[in-house]
Image (cartoon, coloured by chain):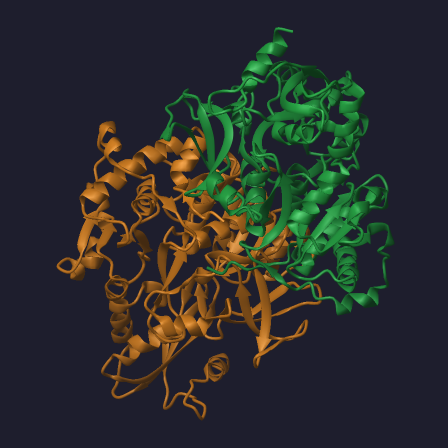
Chain colours: A green, B orange
Amino acid sequence: MNQFMPNWLKQRAELTPDRLAIKTDKEMLSFQQLHTRVKQRAHLLSLSGVESGHHTAILMKNSIEMVETIYAVMSIGAVAVMLNTRLSDHELEWQVLDVEAVHIISNQEYLGKINGLKDKKNIIVSEQIHQVNDEVQSFINVDGEYTPEQVATIMYTSGTTGNPKGVMQTFGNHWSSAIGSALNLGLQSNDRWLLAVPLFHISGLSILMRSVIYGMGIILLERFDANKMNDAIIQDKVTIVSVVTTMLQQMLEKLDKQQYPDSFRCMLAGGGPVPKSLLEECQTRQIPVYQTYGMTETSSQVVTLTPEHSMKKLGSAGKPLFSCQIKIVKDGKECLANEEGEILVKGPNITKGYWKRTKATEEAIQDGWLHTGDQGYKDDDGFLFVLDRRSDLIISGGENVYPAEIEATLLSHPKIRDAGIVGVEDEKWGQTPYAFVVLHEELSKIELVEYCKERLAAYKVPKDFKVIEELPRNASNKLLRRELKDWLNKG
Amino acid sequence: MNQFMPNWLKQRAELTPDRLAIKTDKEMLSFQQLHTRVKQRAHLLSLSGVESGHHTAILMKNSIEMVETIYAVMSIGAVAVMLNTRLSDHELEWQVLDVEAVHIISNQEYLGKINGLKDKKNIIVSEQIHQVNDEVQSFINVDGEYTPEQVATIMYTSGTTGNPKGVMQTFGNHWSSAIGSALNLGLQSNDRWLLAVPLFHISGLSILMRSVIYGMGIILLERFDANKMNDAIIQDKVTIVSVVTTMLQQMLEKLDKQQYPDSFRCMLAGGGPVPKSLLEECQTRQIPVYQTYGMTETSSQVVTLTPEHSMKKLGSAGKPLFSCQIKIVKDGKECLANEEGEILVKGPNITKGYWKRTKATEEAIQDGWLHTGDQGYKDDDGFLFVLDRRSDLIISGGENVYPAEIEATLLSHPKIRDAGIVGVEDEKWGQTPYAFVVLHEELSKIELVEYCKERLAAYKVPKDFKVIEELPRNASNKLLRRELKDWLNKG
C-alpha cells in the first residue's frame, strides 16, 4: 500500500484554492494565499539554515505568522517543536536543550525568556522574517511528500517522574486524529472551527491539522476572550468550538440571554470533566456539548460522546473514535463493565513514543496499548467515564500541572527539606496547585512564590502552602497524596 | 504508528448500534442487528470450512444476504473474491481456478453457471445457510483486527492482454477510498447512500465500505430500476446516489416533471464520461452531478469534481481526492497543462497488485504510480479531462468490455483466422462491441453469436460482425483499431 501523501497545504491549495483557510481580526486568507506565504516563509527559514530533519523550536503566540511558521517548518521537512509560551526561562531552556533544537523561532516578546540560550542556539525572530516578492517562490521546493511514520511535531508533557518528555506526533498520528474526529462529528461544507486554545497545545494544533485536511476555515484568536468567542459564533458563523470548562463557563456568563445561531453545531469540551451543572445549563440553552477525552500522546481526542448520546449520558466522555479502542485494566486483567481500573487506549493516533526516552516509551506503550495512568470505567453500554486523570494530575484552566515537577523545583530550594503538591478546587480554574513543605529553616510565602515564579510557569506556582513536620509516605517511600488531600479538606 | 484497526462492523455496532445500516424493500437492519446476523453467518461459514487466509468466492446478487456474506468472510479473515454474476460459465470457471478459491458461496439461481466446478470446489448455497439461535454467537470470534496491508477483496478486471487479472484490494485501500470520498463530499448525519450498482463491482462494494466506516445507512436495490431509484430518493430521503450514464438518463425520463427533495445532495456519476447534454439537463433540474473517475485498481473514485466546480467545469472528472495525486505522462515525460498523455495516479487507495501476476503488477505500478492506460490532460487550473479510457476499452452500460478478451474467444473458433473488436455507439448502453473477422470458411451470424454466448457474458457478445480480407496492423503487428473504427464510420 502506497503510504506517501502530498504536502497537505500544497494539495489543499491546489484542490480548493479559494476556500477560506484562516481569519483573524486583522485579515483573511484563502488556502492559496496562505500557501503562497508559507512558501515564502519556508524559503526564508531555509536561508536561515533550517533543514529537513532538524528539530526547530517554535515559541510564538497564536497568529497567522505562527500558522505560517508551523506549515513552513513542516514543508521543509523539519520537526516543529511546540513550546508553551507560559513556561519559565528555566523550563524553556531545559526543553530546547533536551530536544536538541537547532533553531528557535520566537516572537519578539518572548526573547527575554530565551536569553540564556542565545549563545547556544540559532534564534530567528519571527517579526524579522520579511515577506519577499513572488519571484522567490520558484526557488523553493515544497513538493516533498509526507509519510505516516515521519515525525511532524514534538510537544513536551510531564508525567509522574518530574522532567517533561517530548511526545513525538507523526504525520500519520495527526492524519488519523483528524479523520477520526470527522467520522464522529461529520464534515459539512459550511464548517468553521473557532481556535482560541493555544496552537502549542495539541488541542489547538489539531484544529489546524483538521483545517488543512478537511479544507475547512478556522477563526483564530490570539487568546481566549469570552466576548470575542461569542461574537465569532454569532457573526462569523462558526460551527464548532474547542473549549475547556473555564472557557465555557465564562462564555455562557457573557452570552447572557443571547442565543447561538442554528449553524453552531458542536462545543467540543476537553481538558478534564465538565461539571454536571454546566452541562445541564447548556442543555437548557440548546448548546450541544460533546465531552471528549484525549491527551498529547493521542494527538487530541480519543474518546468523544457521539451526537445521539450527548444528552443521555451526561458526564461520560463517550465512546472511542472509529479507529480507536479502549480497555480498562486492573492488576493486569481487563475489567468488567462498571469496574474501575486504568484506562488503556490504542489506535493510529497514538504517539510513536517519547523523544530519547526508550524506557519511558516501552513502559507507556505495550502491544500498541497506551497506559494513560488515568482511572475510569466503562458502563454497561460501553461508555467511558473518566474518574481521575493520572491520580496526581492537576488540571488548571485546561493546562496540565504535574505535581512531581513542582515538587522537584521546591526541593531545589536550600530551605526546603521535603515537598508534596496536591490540587485544590478553584472556582475559576477548576484546580490550582497547593504545597505541603517540610523546612530546614523558616521560609516566607513571598520567598517561596518568588522562587517558583522564576523557575515555573505562573499556572504551576502553588497558590498557598502549609508547613508540616513530615510528609505522609508509604513503606516504599511513595508520597500518599490522598492523605494530603484529606488533611486539606479537614482544614 | 499503530496500524491495527478493530473489525469495522463490530466497532460500528458498538459505537452506533441503533443507526440504520441497511434497508431493502423487504426489511431494515440497524448496525447491531446486521452484526448479529453476520456473527451467525460467520459461524456457519466456518463450520463449512471457511478459514482465515482462504480465498472465498462470492457469486450472489445484491441482497442483505450478500452483504452478510461479505462481512462474514471478512470477519473470518478470509479474502472475498467478488464474482460478476453476468459472466459466462467459462469465464467464472477460469476466475475461480485462477484465484485458487477454496469455497464458492452462491445463490441458488447461479448454481447452473458453476456446474463444471462442483467436483473441484466446495460450493455453499447461500439459501441453505440457515439462521441459528443466539447462543451460537458466543462460539464465534470476530475480534480479529484488520491491518492496512491485509487483502480484503479480489475483483477481476481484464486488460489489453486477454485474460482477466485479480485486483487485490486491501483493508487500507478500502479505508483510504472511503476517507478520500468523505473529505471531498462531506459527511452528514442524515446521509443515506442508494446502492443499485452491483456489489461485485467496486462501485457497489465501496458504498458498503463507506456505510460501515461512516456509520451511514444504505438503501439497497437488487438491480437498477429507474422508478425505484426515484422513489428511494424522494421517499427514503436518500442523499447520495452512485450511477452510470445510462442509469441517470432513465431516471430523468421517469422522473418527468417531479423534483428531487432538497435533502438529495449528490449524484455521483462514474463508469465513463457523462454527455454534456445530460449534464446540462441536470443543471436545469438542479440535480448536483459529481463526475468521477476511478477503476477497480483504485478501489473506486480517485478523481472527483468538488462541489464548487461541478457546474463551472462541465465534462471534467475533477481533481484528485485529498490523499491522491495525478500526472499526465507522454514518452516518459510529464506533460504541461492542456497536453495529452497517459493518466498516472498515486495514493493509498491504489491496489497492492494483481494476484499471482508479478510482472503485470510491476508494469502497471512503478514508484507508486499506477499507469492507467487512459488518455487525458489537465487544464490550466489542474482539472483532469479524461479523453479516452484505455484506447481500446469499451464501456457498455457501466461494464468494462476489453476487446482483447472477445478477440481471444473469437480466435478459438475453428472457422475464424483473425479477429478485431471495436466499440460502436449505442443509444441505450453508450457503446457495444462490434467484430471484424477474417475467416477460414463461411460462418453465420447465429453461429458466431451462439459461440460467444456460451463463453462470454451477454454484454460482451458482439452485436454484429463484418467479414474482411485482412485486419489492419502496423509493422510490429499491432492491431490498428482506429482504422477499424474509420471503416465502420464510413459504412
Measured along the vertical axis of the image, is residue A360 above or below residue A43?
A: above
Give the quadrant of the C terminus of chain A.
top right
Residue A323 in view, yes or no: no
At 33% from the left edge and 72% from the top edge, which residue is drawn? B163
Residue A242 in picture, x, y percent from top left:
67, 32
Q: In percent of the image, x 47 and y 83: which residue is there?
A: B487
Which of these two is toward me, B369 or B233? B369
Is residue A227 left or right of B117 when viewed as pictured? right
Q: Furthest-bottom residue in view?
A: B475
Total count of labels: 0
Residue extending furthest front?
Answer: A440
Residue nearest the viewer, comparing B343 with B53: B53
Residue A241, image x and y in percent?
Answer: 68, 32
Q: Quadrant of residue B37?
A: top left
Left or right of residue A20: residue A276: left
What residue is at 33 percent from the left and 55 percent from the top? B82
Camera-side residue of A190 and B486: A190
Does the rendering let one see residue B243? yes
Up-down relation of residue B310 to residue A444 (above or below):
below
Residue occupying the far left of the picture: B119
Q: Position of residue A424 (x, y in %)?
A: 65, 17
Residue lying at 42% horizontally and 68% vertically, measured from the top left: B432
Residue A301, by quadrant, is top right
* For residue A249, above or below residue A47: above
Residue B407 left/right relative to A201? left
**Residue B410, image x, y percentages:** 30, 77
